């Protein structure tokens, strides 16, 4: 397993350590700065800069919201509710990919049901006057602060669990505490037999909170102004369409790098528990106090363009998933697929076979599905127009994240498949953007 950990590091050791230390130390305060700038400093980076110029480091200490009992209660109720849905709702049994040590995780695919129950419950609580979602927005800084510290504690728990009580043989230490904490110890950590931790952090807490907060921002603007601007409607609709697509395809997500390769540590789990609810939802957070009237034609153009990008992103994943399900025998764009039959060896020395799709969307570029994903993020951000730069931080971050992920995935596959991956790259020479990169 230590060798597998080494394979996770695809940059030079200096860059790797610098990146890990930077993200561990800078991401938590950035979440607070993002919230402050969006909600207090009028969305202006210059206003935040002026605040620090006048108040110095003490100003940062003063603006950081303290965790509160109310924030703890909101997070706890939401977390327990989602955990209960994950465990109790019925769902089809789905098998994940075979791990490097030969294990095959088993999941219960009930994400769509959990998603619908969550949104219907949240809107019903507001509609019947039981709970007002504006409370979440009004205490957002406290909630993020509580999540930052609580999730760090949770990552310490994952680190200790990986050492003392791993859930499977897909676990181990690199011998470096920073790497183990950042990248994680376990590939498939579970509590008991059925509660999968990564499904909870990535899907049922992180991605679900994206939809919940999108609705929260929309409701907050309605409560404040008595109406919802068309810019907010476009933003909220596209975000909800994207998250709906995610849960519709959730079983496919369990075959991706996030679940099947990246271990449960700070990078994945803290990111999904804190970074997703704060950074991924930030365009909507900005629009709450900055409604833009786009007009019917522009609003419809952005909406349709965004939905088209989300559909293409979905169809890319669906195409590959169907190719795997039929063992390469189904049609791709109406014809027999072009493919490479590759073999690889597991860490236990067992030889296995895999099919690499080289036609359809996957013949355009090895990671073409990242193009419509980045464009979709642009389309749900552009309703904010261009008065301020910060709403576009998520688009920039997502682009960097996906380009880095494409490199990591290529390096991992090169190590896994050897000569077959070279053949695959010869047939599909572009990594992400056809004809360019």
Image: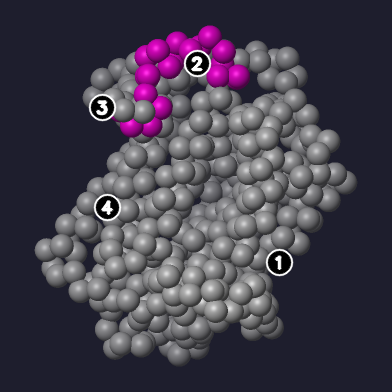
**Crowding near the residue tagged with mark 1, few <14, some 14–19, many ≥20 C-alpha atoms within 10 Å:** some
Outermost residue, front direction? 53
Q: Which is closer to the viewer, label 3 or label 1?
A: 1
**Mark 3 or mark 4: whose residue is earlier in sequence:** 4
**Mark 1 or mark 4: whose residue is earlier in sequence:** 1
Q: Which is closer to the viewer, label 3 or label 2?
A: 2
The prevailing secondary structure element of the residues shown in magenta is helix
Circle 4 SS class: helix
- State how far apart marks 1 and 2 are (Cα): 41 Å
Q: Is residue 238 left or right of residue 152?
A: left
Query: Residue 319 location in percent, x, y?
Result: 36, 32
- State how far apart marks 3 and 2 are (Cα): 23 Å
Residue 248 visible in the current orientation: no
Query: Residue 136 location in percent, x, y?
Result: 52, 79
Q: Residue at 11% across / 63% down in the picture?
A: 297
Q: Which mark is residue 421?
A: 2
Determine if the magenta segment contains residue 268: no
Residue occupied by mark 3: 333
Q: Residue at 67% across / 56% down in the picture?
A: 25
- State how far apart marks 3 and 1 are (Cα): 47 Å
Residue occupied by mark 4: 307
Residue occupied by mark 1: 150
Query: Residue 8 location in percent, x, y?
Result: 65, 32
User: Nearest the camera: 333 or 273?
Assistant: 273
In the image, the segment drawn in magenta is 414-434
Circle 2 SS class: helix
């Amino acid at each position: 397993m230590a060798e597998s950990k080494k394979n996770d590091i695809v940059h030079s050791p200096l860059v790797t350590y610098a990146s890990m230390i930077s993200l561990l130390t800078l991401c938590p305060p950035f979440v607070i700065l993002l919230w402050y700038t969006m909600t207090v400093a009028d969305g202006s980076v210059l206003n935040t800069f002026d605040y620090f110029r006048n108040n110095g480091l003490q100003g940062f200490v003063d603006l950081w919201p303290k965790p509160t009992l109310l924030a703890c209660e909101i997070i706890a109720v939401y977390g327990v509710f989602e955990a209960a849905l994950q465990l109790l709702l019925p769902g089809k049994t789905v098998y994940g990919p075979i791990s490097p040590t030969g294990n095959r995780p088993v999941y219960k695919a009930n994400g769509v049901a959990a998603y619908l129950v969550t949104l219907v419950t949240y809107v019903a609580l507001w509609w019947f006057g039981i709970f007002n979602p504006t409370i979440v927005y009004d205490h957002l800084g406290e909630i993020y602060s509580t999540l930052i510290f609580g999730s760090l504690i949770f990552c310490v728990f994952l680190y200790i669990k990986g050492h003392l009580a791993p859930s499977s043989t897909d676990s181990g230490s690199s011998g470096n505490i920073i790497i183990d904490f950042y990248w994680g110890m376990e590939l498939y950590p579970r509590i008991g037999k059925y509660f999968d931790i990564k499904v909870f952090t990535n899907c049922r807490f992180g991605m679900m909170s994206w939809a919940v907060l999108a609705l929260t921002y929309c409701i907050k603007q309605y409560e404040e102004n008595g109406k919802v601007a068309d810019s907010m409607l476009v933003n909220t609709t596209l975000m909800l369409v994207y998250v709906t697509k995610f849960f519709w395809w959730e079983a496919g997500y369990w075959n991706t790098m996030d679940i099947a390769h990246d271990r449960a540590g700070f990078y994945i789990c803290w990111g999904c528990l804190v970074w997703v609810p704060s950074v991924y939802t930030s365009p909507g957070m900005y629009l709450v106090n900055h409604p833009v009237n786009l007009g019917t034609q522009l609003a419809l153009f952005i909406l349709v363009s965004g939905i088209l990008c989300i559909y293409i992103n979905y169809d890319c994943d669906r195409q590959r998933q169907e190719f795997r399900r039929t063992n390469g025998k189904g049609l791709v764009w109406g014809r027999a697929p072009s493919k490479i039959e590759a073999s690889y060896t597991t860490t236990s020395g067992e030889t296995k076979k895999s099919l690499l799709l080289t036609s359809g969307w996957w013949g355009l570029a090895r990671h073409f599905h990242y193009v419509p994903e980045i464009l979709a993020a642009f389309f749900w951000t552009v309703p904010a127009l261009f008065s301020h730069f910060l709403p576009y931080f998520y688009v920039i971050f997502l682009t960097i994240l996906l380009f880095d992920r494409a490199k990591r995935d290529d390096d991992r596959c090169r190590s896994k498949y050897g000569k077959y991956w070279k053949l695959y790259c010869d047939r599909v020479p572009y990594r992400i953007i056809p004809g360019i990169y």
